[in-house]
Image (tube, rainbow, N blue to C red):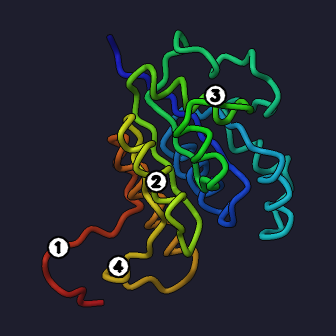
Amino acid sequence: MARAERLIVGISGASGVVYGVRALELLREAGVETHLVMSKSAELTLAYETRLKLKAVHALASKVYRQEDIGAAIASGSFPILGMLVAPCSIRSLAEIATGVTSTLLTRAADVTLKERRRLVLMVRETPLHLGHLRAMTAVTEIGAIVMPPVPAFYARPASVADIVTQSVGRALDLFGFELGAVKRWSGKPSQS
């Protein structure tokens, strides 16, 4: 079976909506088909944290789904995808995914990704963490997801917030096997720049 060059991108309502937007940009540049679902909270966060319009973010995706569209293609395991990235991933979304008790298309698509044994990467955005958060992260990891908080890689010597975002998103997309040229790789030696 050929590898599906198709990825679901979920954007939940945690701070850091730029992570999901940057993922869409990088995947579009690479010619990867993207299927976007944003929570209502993510739409609000977009307005608070950026100057982007929702229509502009939707235009970055190959296909966009409404959060309420539980009958969407991405809600079925028979829809072939490589996996799903949730960037950022709120604690609420994480908890729904960890328990399998899903209430939205975003968390349903993540649940389907796991049940089909496909890669699910959750860029969890919360700090500090209490024991309930940590237990949910453990639970979701035990059922096959990868929890990847967007932690800055300062060895890459970022010159801007955009550099930090791109490095974090690029590393998350590495987990799906994409080499997008966006990541500054550690060479074992200090950077000479």
The three-letter amino acid code for the residue at tag 1 is: Ser
Dot placed on the residue nearer the N-terminal end, 1 or 4: 4
Label 2, secondary structure: give it: helix
Dot placed on the residue nearer the N-terminal end, 3 or 2: 3
Q: How crowded is mark 3: few (under 14 residues within 10 Å), some or many (20 or more)?
A: many
Q: Residues within 10 Å of mark 2 (few under 14, many from 20)?
A: few
Q: Which residue is drawn at 41% across and 41% down?
A: 145
The three-letter amino acid code for the residue at tag 3 is: Arg
Q: How far apart are marks 1 and 4 (CA)?
A: 10 Å
Q: Distance between the residues labelled 4 and 2?
A: 31 Å
Mark 4 vs mark 3: in front:
3
Q: Mark 1 points at which residue?
A: 187
Q: Position of residue 80 (x, y in %)?
A: 49, 16
Label 4, secondary structure: give it: helix
Label 3, secondary structure: give it: helix
56 vs 124, nearest the viewer: 124
Mark 2 vs mark 1: in front:
2
Q: Residue at x 45, y 64 (%)?
A: 168
Q: Mark 4 points at which residue?
A: 156
Dot placed on the residue nearer the N-terminal end, 4 or 2: 2
Q: Quadrant of residue 171?
A: bottom left
**The N terminus appears in which quarter of the rendering?**
top left
Q: Mark 3 points at which residue?
A: 108
**The C terminus appears in which quarter of the rendering?**
bottom left
Q: Which residue is drawn at 64% across and 20% down?
A: 75
Dot placed on the residue nearer the N-terminal end, 4 or 3: 3
The three-letter amino acid code for the residue at tag 2 is: Arg
Circle 3/circle 1 CB separation < 8 Å: no
Report whether 87 appears left or right of 145: right
Q: Name the residue under label 2.
A: 135
Q: How far apart are marks 3 and 2 (CA)?
A: 20 Å
Q: Position of residue 31 (x, y in %)?
A: 51, 37
